[in-house]
Amino acid sequence: MELADLGKSLRLHWRLSVACVLLGIVGLALFLVTRHQVRPANRYRVTVDLLVPAISPKAGGRPAGVPPGMLVDQNRVALSKKTEKAALDAAKIPKDNRRGIGFVFRASPTSDIISIGATAHDPKIAAAVAAAFEHAYVADRRQTVANGLKSAADSATSSLATLQARLAVVRALLKKINPGVLATLPLTSTRGSVSSPLPLFTPLPTILLVVEHKQLALRILGAETSYATNITDALVPQSFAQVVEVGGAAQITPPLPSSKTPALPFLGIGLLLALVAPIVIDRLDRSIRSAKTAAIAFGSIVMTSVPAGSRRLFHSLVPPGTPQDGAYRALAAMSIATDRLPAAIVVTSPTGTVQDTVAANFAAALAGLGLRVALIATDSRQSWFLDTRRDPEDSGVPFPDVLELAHRGALDGTLPSSLVRTNLEKLVVLPPGVEDREIRLDGLRPLLETLSTSNVDVTVIAGPAVLEDPNATILAWTTRSVLWAFETGEVTEAEAKEAASRVALAGATSFGIAMVNGKT
């Protein structure tokens, strides 16, 4: 597919392209008129920024004294059903009025600033729910800390029981092997205290038991301290969250959908169809619409391309000075310049009647260039050939009658009176008769020979269509020369090839092609 082919398709089917674009515009207009747009209800958002501990690589990881649970998975805690329900309950939002209320949780890139908030259709409700959400989230953090401290206290209690049981065993062993040393060892210990040195040559088992006793006493002290610290901290747990800023109610109502969004697809589809539809039609349409295609199909050259004109011109000679007149004069001039213009030529087409117009105007153009031309009408529909006769009363002898005379050899002296003179000095017409009837085509050759000896330079026969009337092939066989005529869009490539093959089989040669552009 070349760019020139695209341009040609658009020029040929420009009305279809315009219709596709207009269809897209009409479709867009109908869509915009009929679509039901409902403006979304107003929505407001209120957020609260909190400063919370975060893992810092520069500080070496987790901040001191901060439970690990305060540093991870805080969005799960904030957006849990429990926290959201607590916020709605604290804000005193009725259960049947909670639809449309949403919760917001965002964290900064460093995770030390988190924003929690609420969205609602009313700014006061959004503010109340956001404040309640902040309190519920902070309370949940405190509860998480308290639960962790209680768990640590329980762990310390369990460790303390184990250590004390072992200490009792150690003291029982020392009492058995060295009661004196046991008397110097207290049941409890304080950090930093110094115990009395053991006597020289104390047995190794005793030394080991004494060391274990001291370590157990210190571990028991640590467990007791840990338990006391955790159990007291759990009474008033920290939240590890500090309010930084409370934002105002911000309106977040979504805007109405833009009209540009549907406009682009509609117009895009319309433009796409405007480009594609002509190409598709040309690809599916096998009719001949170009000189290149015509030359290939007929196996000849296009000698002229007649511009499109009114349909009434198909039944009359084209007016002088018009583009159509110039095209026919160019055809006549080229025919003479080839030096192979035959004495008789039949103008025909694969189908249709456009050959009538071409034959008449071709004959008139040849006469206008100084040749003596006889135009033979072979069908009653061609009676308009007589519209330019010089004498309205001169009806001449019909073509079938002249053929009958030629068949009988009685044409001498009759031919001049059979031809109708026209307003063109060198153009005469052999009329077709008032009705179609069987004609004696075997009299055509004597007729043509008589015309050639009667000061006629060229005889132009307006023949029937090759694929519609077998007489066209006989006419071509008799003249041995054919000028093809066709109207663009009316003859397919297959029809042209079949008609050309029939004429070639009859021994006739193609003189050339006259392409008449149809109305687009």
Image: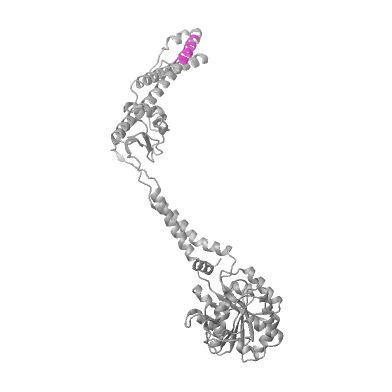
Q: Nearer the viewer, residue 114 or 272?
A: 272
Q: Compared to 151, does 311 lie above or below?
A: below
Asked whether 168 falls inside the magenta stretch, the response is yes
Q: Nearer the viewer, residue 374 or 204?
A: 374
Q: Compared to 17, does 127 lie above or below?
A: above
Query: Quarter-wise, where is residue 508 in the image?
Result: bottom right
Q: Residue at coordinates 48% horizontally, 61% vertically from top-left?
A: 274
Residue 431 appears left or right of 197: right
Asked whether 70 falls inside the magenta stretch, the response is no
Q: Which residues are magenta?
A: 160-172
Q: Compared to 34, does 346 lie above or below?
A: below
The main secondary structure of the magenta stretch is helix
Q: Nearer the viewer, residue 257 or 495?
A: 495
Residue 367, image x, y percentages:
55, 87
Q: Nearer the viewer, residue 101 or 49?
A: 101
User: Which image quarter holds the N terminus?
Assistant: bottom right
Callout count: 0
Residue 435 appears left or right of 75: right
Residue 308 shows in this picture: no
Residue 285 appears left or right of 34: right
Residue 225 shows in this picture: yes
Residue 509, image x, y percentages:
67, 80
